[in-house]
Image (cartoon, rainbow, N blue to C red):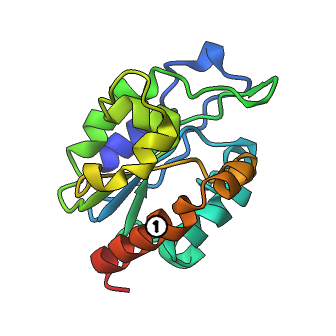
Amino acid sequence: MDDLLKRIAACVVCKEHLPFPPKPVVAISAESKILIIGQAPGIKAHNSGVPWNDVSGDELRRWLGVTREQFYDTKIFTIMPMGFCYPGRGKSGDLPPRPECAPLWHPQVMEYLKNLKLTLLIGSYAINYYINRKPKTSVSEVVKDFEGYLPRFFPLVHPSPRNRKWQRDNPWFLEKVIPELQKQVKKITGR
């Protein structure tokens, strides 16, 4: 796995499309039990080199019911976004993850994750890539039907502050989905 991590760190496949030099932000271990697949690192994660190192990460940790220390323990969690580098800023937020990363790196990383018990698919990019959903099925509908994707996948909306209104409009998410997510995480981690 060390060789794979070195190759990921040295990746320049989409260099000409990025606002800054490539800086893949991942946290990977062959021992991990839970895989978190989000969209792409934000500017804070890019600058620090630490995935989910922002308000969205704080919310995700709250949803999972884990401490910051547990979250960054790669024996528990591997963190692998759809796009490994910060894609830049668009009109209404960060640009979409670069499409080159997932097909290039995900299969190679997955080969090492033999202890994996659950994959969290966070946001539309991860859900669209990994779940073959029916046409016109919204991300909300996929998340609401999360039990239909267990035990392999657990689809979630993105924990961005931009989605707080969505959470208020969809109380079932905090009432049903998050308690089950915490139950699954606790069962897998024993904590």
Q: Nearer the viewer, residue 129 or 70?
A: 129
Question: Residue at point 52% right, 32% down?
Answer: 83
The three-letter amino acid code for the residue at tag 1 is Lys
Q: Look at the picture and state if 64 lies above or below 104.
A: below
Q: Which residue is mark 1?
A: 176
- Kindly tell me whether residue 48 is visible in this rendering: no
Task: Give above or below for 79 relative to 18.
Answer: below
- Residue 16 coordinates in the image, percent (x, y): 63, 13
Q: Quadrant of residue 191?
A: bottom left
Residue at 42% x, 37% y is: 127
Q: Which residue is painted at 56% across and 79% down in the image?
A: 67
Graded by Cα atoms within 10 Å as few (under 14), some (14 to 19) or many (20 or more), the crowding at tag 1 reads few
Q: Is residue 189 left or right of residue 12?
A: left
Residue 32 rendering spot, x and y as whole percentages: 31, 63
Q: Position of residue 51 (x, y in %)?
A: 58, 53
Is 159 placed left or right of 111 in the picture?
right
Q: Is residue 44 left or right of residue 29?
A: right
